[in-house]
Image (cartoon, helix red, strand yellow):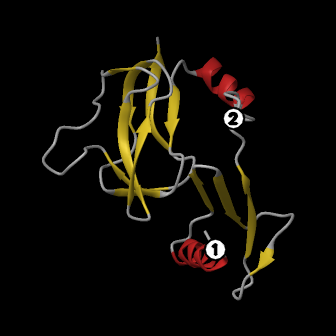
Amino acid sequence: MDLKDIKAIIDLMKKNSVSEFELEKQDFKIRLKRGMPGNSIQSEDGGQQMIAYAPMPAALPAASGDAPAAAAVAAVSNEVDIKSPMIGTFYRTPSPDAAAYVEVGTEVNPDTVVCIIEAMKVMNEIKAEAKGVITQILVEGAKPVEFGQPLFKIRPL
């Protein structure tokens, strides 16, 4: 990915009022955030974009910095969110005439595909990453989603 591609993504973020964007591809990772303090670049309209990218390590630890927040949510409710790992268009089915990947009441495993998110003309399969039962579907099909937006709620088993 070159600077021209990054600038095009930033322009799309401004045009669509997207505050955060993340892309991971093999050994490359880029995360863009708008309106964040710190290392930033001033854009023509005065907004800020934080740009950080680096090669990804061979393996990432399973725990994330959001573990305390997730534990607090789990204490209030036994349900866990399946969140969007990227911005794009959410699809519940692999094709317009196919059945949905999951419905409310479907039991899922960590490797169960729950939906597809189309980003930059690439269809990305999103997996449950947890074992449980789908309790809520939070997004309608063919609707745009943002990075970190909850897509489903599951009750862990």
The residue located at (65%, 54%) in the rendering is 29
Task: Tell me: 100 left or right of 66.
Answer: left
- The amino acid type, in three-letter code, at marker 2 is Leu
The percent coordinates of residue 101 (x first, y second) are: 28, 35
In the image, residue 55 sits, relative to residue 104, either above or below, namely: below
**In the foreground, 90 or 155:** 90
Give the SS element for disc 2: loop
The percent coordinates of residue 59 (x first, y second) are: 68, 34
Report crowding for label 1: few under 14, some 14 to 19, many 20 or more residues within 10 A (C-alpha).
few
**In the foreground, 124 or 83:** 124
The residue located at (63%, 73%) in the rendering is 6
Q: Quadrant of residue 58?
A: top right
The percent coordinates of residue 65 (x first, y second) are: 75, 35
Disc 1: which residue? 2
In the image, residue 124 sits, relative to residue 152, either above or below, namely: below
Q: Earlier in the sequence, mark 2 or mark 1?
A: 1
CA gap, disc 2 and disc 1:
24 Å
Task: Tell me: 55 left or right of 124.
Answer: right
Residue 60: mark in rendering = 2
- The amino acid type, in three-letter code, at marker 1 is Asp
Direction left: furthest residue: 97
In the image, residue 28 sits, relative to residue 105, either above or below, namely: below
The residue located at (63%, 74%) in the rendering is 2
Residue 24: mark in rendering = none
Give the SS element for disc 1: loop
Q: Quadrant of residue 105?
A: top left
Direction right: furthest residue: 38
Direction top: furthest residue: 157
The percent coordinates of residue 102 (x first, y second) are: 29, 31
Q: Where the N terminus falls, by quadrant?
A: bottom right
Task: Tell me: 21 left or right of 118.
Answer: right
Report crowding for label 2: few under 14, some 14 to 19, many 20 or more residues within 10 A (C-alpha).
few
